[in-house]
Image: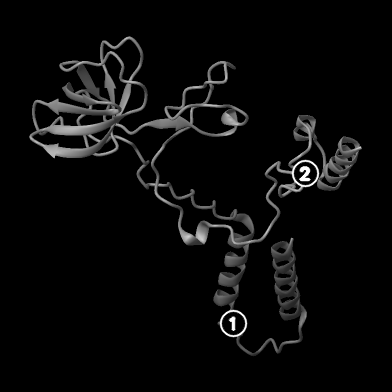
Amino acid sequence: MASRRVLSSLLRSSSSGRSAAKFGTRNPRLPSPSPARHAAPFANILGRVAEYSTTSSPAPPPPAKDESPKKTYDYGGKGAIGKVCQVIGAIVDVRFEDQEGLPPIMTSLEVQDHPTRLVLEVSHHLGQNVVRTIAMDGTEGLVRGRRVLNTGAPITVPVGRATLGRIMNVLGEPIDERGEIKTEHYLPIHRDAPALVDLATGQEILATGIKGLLDGKYDDLPEQSFYMVGGIDEVVAKAEKISKESAA
């Protein structure tokens, strides 16, 4: 609207100037005056205003693409096969054939041909292509020579809203008999600590579910006192009442 008003005002001023020059008094014997030199700049201004009023606003530039590489958990050596060479309780030593298949520390290994799923986590390199691992489950029935697969990735567990209220083991497997945890978000069990700037420094109440501790004041109460539920004042009142009744 503003550009149209500017264009109309410029056109009106141009037409009024032309009419004044046409009907003004002039001596016919005098030569015709030469055209004003400012006509060309004025026409240039009109052209620019018209061009500005007709052109559309430039399209916004496309958003910059996030070219940062996505974080992956490929530790290398995926698919390499090793063999169990020693079992001492939860400590299992695994020997690999070459250096290329040697898994890095914190890599997840899976024992093959075992009655149950047995996952090992690499903790040390002992030399001579031997790694020392920690078993995430019992090693009963595990013998030397058993094949071990290098997964090339760390142990990951499901994260997100799907895990709220669920109970799982260190491998992320549900143990609450409520079915599988359906989610597409997984994170390794070993992660870097968050930066200091990402930590919350505000003071707020943390709801832990603990209502109150009686500090051994009512240790002589019967067993029913340990099942009281409620606020701290309510629990203390119930404890005092039970104490008086038991003393009587």
* Residue placed most toward the observer, 41 or 32: 41
Q: For the residue marked with disc 2, what is the amino acid?
A: Tyr
| Residue at the (22%, 24%) spot, across then down | 87
The location of residue 175, given as percent across then percent down, is: 52, 21
Alpha carbon of mark 2 to alpha carbon of mark 1: how far? 109 Å
Residue under label 2: 218
Front tag of 2 and 1: 2
Q: Quadrant of residue 163?
A: top right
Horizontal arrangement in the rendering, residue 44 relative to residue 218 (left or right): left
Given residues 166 and 86, the one toward you in this image is 86
Please report whichever mark, 2 or 1, sits nearer to the chain's N-terminal start: 1
Q: Which residue occupies 23% across, 21% down?
A: 149
**Residue 234: horizontal and vertical position, in percent?**
87, 43
Is residue 131 depicted above or below 58 in this figure? above
Q: Quadrant of residue 46?
A: bottom right
| Residue under numbered circle 1 | 36
Decide if residue 62 is on the left or right side of residue 143.
right
